[in-house]
Image (cartoon, rainbow, N blue to C red):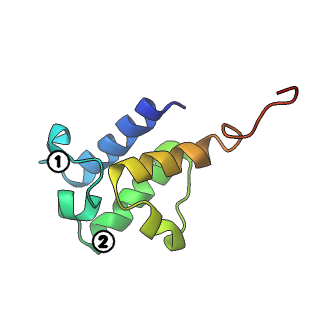
Amino acid sequence: MNRQMIRNEVLSALKSIAPELEAGRLLPDRPLREEVDLDSMDWLRFIEALNRSLGVAIAETDYQHVDTLDKLVDYLGQKANPCADEPSIGD
């Protein structure tokens, strides 16, 4: 799954929690919870929605590493494609 597909899934999950969200106004390097005004229950529902749509579980200990849109997309990309950064045989 490429970065744009993951980003689209993240935005779709966000919109399911916060339908008033204007995705074009999100700043990719700002804390998502502040940008979208998510309380702790909304955050957990958002994380669960990502798990269902992408099949990637985000450990609670990793929440601090996925606080912005860019960081979250990178994290999900690494978890969804764990071998993407590893060199292939023969490189």
Q: Position of residue 32 (x, y in %)?
A: 28, 58
Kind of residue indicated by mark 1: Pro
- The local secondary structure at tag 2 comes to helix
Instruction: Identify residue for label 2.
Output: 41
The N terminus - image quarter:
top right
Q: Could you tell which of marks 1 and 2 lies nearer the N-terminus?
A: 1
Mark 1, Cα crowd under 10 Å, few <14 / some 14-19 / many 20+, is few
Tell me which residue sits at (33%, 65%) in the image. Answer: 43
Q: Position of residue 38 (x, y in %)?
A: 23, 65
Q: Residue 19: which disc?
A: 1
Image quadrant in which you'd find residue 89: top right
How many marks the image carries: the answer is 2
Tell me which residue sits at (38%, 38%) in the image. Answer: 7
Q: Position of residue 34 (x, y in %)?
A: 20, 64
The C terminus - image quarter:
top right
- The local secondary structure at tag 1 comes to loop
Mark 1 → mark 2, Cα distance in angstroms: 16 Å
Q: Residue 3: which disc?
A: none
Kind of residue indicated by mark 2: Met
Q: Is residue 43 left or right of residue 47?
A: left
